[in-house]
Image (tube, helix red, strand yellow):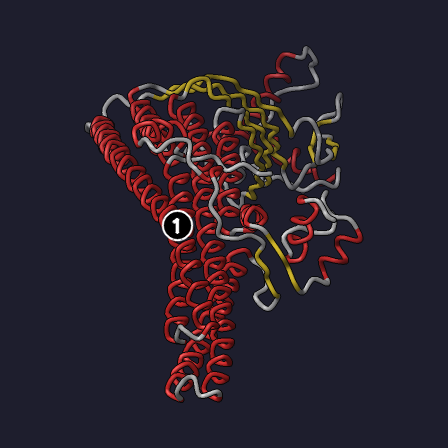
Amino acid sequence: MLTKKWKIATLLLFIGVVGTESLWAQSDIVQNAKNLEEITITIDEAIQIALINNYMIRKGLLDIETAESQIREAWGSVYPQVNTAGSYTRNLQTPNPFAGSDAGGLFETLGAIDWLAYNESARTDGDPNTAPIPIDEFFDRQRQGFEDAGLGVPGFGSGNPFAVENQFEFGLSVTQTLYNGAAFAAIRGARQVRELNEDQTELDRQIVVDQIKNSFYTALLAREQYQVLKASVERLRETVEETRKSVDAGMLSRFDRISAEVELVNLETRLIEVENQSELAIKNLALQLGIPTRSKLNLRGALEFDESLLPDTFDPDLAYEVALQQRPDLSQTAGLIELLKVEGEMTRSGYMPTLSAFANAAYIGQVPSNRTSVMAVEGEEFTYRSESRSFFDNSYWNPAVAVGLRFNWSIFNGFQTRMRVEQNAISVRQAEIDREFQKNAIYLEIEQTVRSLETALRRINSQQRNIEQAELNYEFALKRLTEGVGTPLQERQASSLLDQSRVNYLTAVYDYLIALSQYEKAIGKPILND
């Protein structure tokens, strides 16, 4: 015999909820589960399957995972923010940075500056062989020197010495929030959302358990009604046979036989209808459990009442106090109020400044396309040489580092923050009114379920006594019919009363179990996994 846990694992494997890698799965169980065509379950096993397989619960668990991610996301707003960026710019034409100013003609005089420097050196070098020369001669001799060195002749007065064709920048920035009231309130809000989702998941579990109990008990009731009606049909068949014998013996008329046969046909028709209802109820339960409806589902259990099914208390006031502590929807409403208060803190944080620290580091390159530099040969007039620099020469690349604090404070925004604070306070008051109504509705719900329990319990007690009387009445009628002093009609009436008493008892037990499930849901009885 499989234990309860192994049996549930087998059923879950059959309906495709868990894979073969599950902790519950063993090779023989997996193989047997795949070959199952007939399943027998109790109500506890049905509940366990639903708590794992129900779509609403599975979605609720994903909502909790989403809330966990939102908490981590909220924390991310107060963690250091690290960013990197890079850029490349190709300058096709660079404007004169001094255009329109008194220094606008600087470019045109750069060549003259070289000439003035040459003449100043000639006058002060103490060599009688050197003397200042006119500017035209200076430019001619300089141009000749460039040509002799195989270098291009510079076009004086036409270039832009500040122009660099290629510009590169690679940077890293780090920002750390030092104070931001909205960010820290958002973290508390994300935690509150997780608690709301946890309460919703517990509420979903209670709803699912109540639904499964209703469906399971409904299927049991349909099955029990079928069994009662089937027994009635079998008794009526025996009565019809006895009636035929009595008619043949001349003790009864043909009218009695025909009446009994007509009643039998009607009862057999009713039996077919009840059997169909029973099968549909079981298939509906299978659908809720996620079990393939083509498979045969057998229910283990019966509609019976015993003292263990009595609630802890029939006092609505005591049950209400328990509900205030256990109801997940009440906890959810309280959590919603707290969430609205957190949102109010986030709104009020608009009155406060934000402060953050930053550090930026960059590596900047300004690399010309022509990286050849021309320089004079030391000790020789108008003699030049050239030198090429690499792309990553230090003269082109320079680091830049900056640190600081960033402060932001909205002094006045047209009273927008104040109005949002007032709106949030109104939302909190509305939620508190909803909670007050909810508490009153819960008390009424508990009172109604307690009344339903008490009514069903009284019906159960009365129907138990009624069944005993109906059984004695049927035995007496059957005995009279056997002795020839009673009539088939009296026997059928007694049989019908017995069947009706049994059906009434089953219905009373069913109503009690349904009311008990509603009572447990009303007080928020926790759902425990076995």
Crowd band around label 1 with a 10 angstrom C-alpha radius: few (<14), some (14–19), many (20+): few
Q: Report if residue 300 is visible in the image.
A: yes
Q: Is residue 211 above or below residue 490?
A: above
Disc 1 marks a residue whose amino acid type is Arg
Camera-nearest residue between 349 and 337: 337
List the residue tagged with mark 1: 465
For image coordinates 53% across by 29% down, the residue present is 110
Q: Compared with residue 375, is residue 264 higher up or lower down, i.e. above or below?
A: below
Q: For the point 31% across and 26% down, which residue is it?
A: 341
Rendered image quadrant of residue 416: top left
Q: Secondary structure at mark 1?
A: helix
Percent from the top left, x then y, of residue 411? 26, 21
* Image coords of residue 415 (percent x, y): 19, 27
Residue 317 image position (x, y, % from top left): 30, 28
Q: Is residue 151 above or below residue 71?
A: below
Picture quadrant where residue 523 is located: top left
List the single residue furthest toward the right. Answer: 27
* Residue 423 visible in the current orientation: no
* Residue at the image position 38 percent from the left and 31 percent from the top: 313
Q: Is residue 3 left or right of residue 511?
A: right
Residue found at x 50% / y 84%: 245
**Residue 324: percent from the left, percent from the top?**
35, 28
Q: Camera-side residue: 101 or 136?
A: 101
As rendered, which of 421 and 151 lies closer to the eye? 421
